[in-house]
Image (cartoon, rainbow, N blue to C red):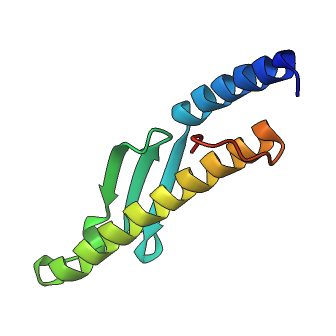
């Protein structure tokens, strides 16, 4: 792999990282009763809870669904990051990169 190839790969990685960070990933739980949106930087940007789906006695169930929706969004962001790295490096494992 030449220096030119490495520079091209670095440029591709930077562009893909910018695109990933600008993306949003939506996690849901309870059939959409809870929706969490997470950025490609793994920052939660939005939380929606359907008030029709819960009452005051269901707080424990709501808490479980919020956690499940956050995990779903995190998993989607992580999978996108892994796909990005795999396509940018052609499957080449680079130490210290994600």
Q: Position of residue 48 (x, y in %)?
A: 33, 55
Q: Position of residue 41 (x, y in %)?
A: 45, 38
Q: 50 and 83: which one is in front? A: 83
Which residue is at the far left?
56
Q: Position of residue 5 (x, y in %)?
A: 85, 22
- In the rendered image, the quadrant that contains the C terminus is top right
In the rendered view, does 32 fall on the left or right side of 5?
A: left
Q: Position of residue 19 (x, y in %)?
A: 62, 30
Q: 89 and 66: which one is in front? A: 89
Residue at the location (32% across, 52% down)?
47
Note whether 76 is above or below 41 in the view shown.
below
Residue 90, quarter of picture: top right
Residue at the location (33% across, 73% down)?
65
- In the rendered image, the quadrant that contains the N terminus is top right
Q: 3 and 45: which one is in front? A: 3
Residue 51, quarter of picture: bottom left
Note whether 14 is above or below 68 in the view shown.
above
Note whether 40 is above or below 75 in the view shown.
above
Residue at the location (28% across, 71% down)?
52
Residue at the location (56% across, 37% down)?
23
Labels in figure, total: 0
């Amino acid at each position: 792999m030449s220096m030119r190839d490495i520079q091209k790969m670095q440029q591709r990685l930077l562009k893909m990282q910018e695109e990933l960070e600008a993306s949003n990933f939506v996690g849901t739980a309870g059939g959409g009763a809870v929706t969490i949106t997470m950025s490609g930087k793994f920052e939660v940007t939005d939380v929606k809870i359907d008030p029709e789906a819960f009452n005051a006695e269901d707080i424990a169930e709501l808490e479980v669904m919020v956690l499940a929706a956050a995990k779903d969004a995190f998993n989607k962001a992580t999978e996108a990051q892994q796909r990005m790295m795999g396509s940018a490096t052609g499957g080449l494992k680079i130490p210290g990169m994600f």
